[in-house]
């Protein structure tokens, strides 16, 4: 496994709402190619998919702490005013493929079945997809501009400025709710297998 140090990234990357317009796939104004759909709409574990495609899979934990929910996150978690936020970058063979932001109520940290308080650098997806009672909401999509916070992170990691595809959905297990947003960075095959990055 690689011992190359991760780049220093300021946490949280996403600190303000309104940068993403989350839409149902049928409402997205840019037609999805088959390659895009294969990644963005795949109902399976993204972690498992990335591990299959790489020899060296690593999770860079940018941070996890309790904070105020963003406006577009509040509808998913009901009347919870503050929640735990965890941001990570998923690396495949030394390349950053995915930025992920997970949001869950403080009560989820106490749910032993989920082990959210002791994840460390373990991928959240593996824990969620092991849950016997797991359910998942419909997937929403967005395109983030180069000037968005994640767009700037993408450039900080050495990639040219272009719009980035993201997706999010809510996972339900152990009577808890976990909102997960995933943005595909420049190294992701979602872009490299397509005729263009748009």
Image (cartoon, rainbow, N blue to C red):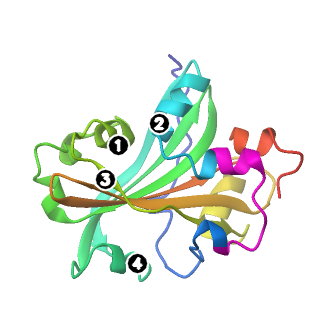
Q: Nearer the viewer, residue 6 or 50?
A: 50
Q: Which residues are magenta?
A: 27-38
Q: Kindly report the distance in space between the C-alpha atoms of the residues bearing marks 1 and 3.
A: 15 Å
Disc 3 marks which residue?
Answer: 135
Q: Which mark is residue 70?
A: 4
Instruction: Give how far across and how far down residue 106 sits, in percent.
Output: 17, 63
Q: Residues within 10 Å of mark 4 (few under 14, many from 20)?
A: some
Label whose residue precedes the other's in the sequence (4 or 2): 2
Point out which mark residue 196 bears: none
Cβ atoms under marks 1 and 2 closer than 8 Å: yes
Whether residue 29 appears in magenta in the rendering, the answer is yes
Q: Say which label, 4 or 1, has the lower sequence index.
A: 4
**Residue located 89% across and 45% down the image:** 195
Label 1 vs 3, first from the N-terminus:
1
Residue 46 placed where, x, y %? 50, 40
Return the residue found at the far right.
195
- Residue designated by label 1: 124
Residue named by callout 2: 47
Mark 2 and mark 3: Cα distance apart in space: 17 Å
The picture places residue 130, in percent across and down from the top left corner, at 28, 35
Above or below — where is 51 with respect to 83?
A: above
Q: CA distance from mark 4 to mark 1?
A: 21 Å
Give the percent coordinates (x, y) of residue 82: 24, 75
Disc on the earlier residue, 2 or 3: 2
Q: Residue at x 67, y 68 (%)?
A: 144
Question: Could one spot residue 116 in this view of the protein?
Answer: yes
Disc 1 crowd, CA 10 A, few/some/many (<14, 14-19, 20+): many
Q: Nearer the viewer, mark 1 or mark 3?
A: 3
Dot 3 lies on which element?
strand
| Within-10-Å neighbours for mark 3: few <14, some 14–19, many 20+ | few
* First of labels 1, 2 by sequence position: 2
């Amino acid at each position: 496994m690689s011992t190359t140090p991760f780049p220093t990234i300021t946490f949280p990357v996403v600190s303000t709402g309104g940068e993403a317009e989350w839409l149902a796939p049928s409402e997205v104004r840019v037609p999805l190619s088959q390659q895009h759909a294969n990644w963005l709409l795949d109902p399976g574990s993204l972690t498992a998919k990335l591990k299959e495609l790489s020899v060296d899979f690593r999770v860079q934990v940018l941070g996890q702490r309790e904070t105020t929910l963003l406006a577009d996150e509040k509808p998913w978690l009901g009347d919870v005013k503050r929640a735990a936020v965890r941001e990570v970058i998923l690396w495949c063979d030394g390349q950053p493929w995915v930025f992920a932001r997970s949001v869950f109520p403080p009560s989820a940290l106490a749910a032993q079945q989920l082990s959210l308080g002791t994840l460390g650098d373990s991928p959240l997806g593996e824990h969620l997809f092991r849950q016997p009672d797991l359910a998942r909401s419909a997937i929403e999509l967005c395109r983030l501009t180069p000037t968005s916070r994640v767009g700037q992170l993408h450039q900080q990691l050495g990639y040219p400025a272009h719009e980035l595809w993201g997706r999010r959905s809510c996972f339900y297990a152990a009577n808890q709710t976990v909102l997960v947003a995933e943005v595909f960075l420049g190294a992701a095959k979602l872009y490299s297998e397509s005729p263009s990055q748009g």
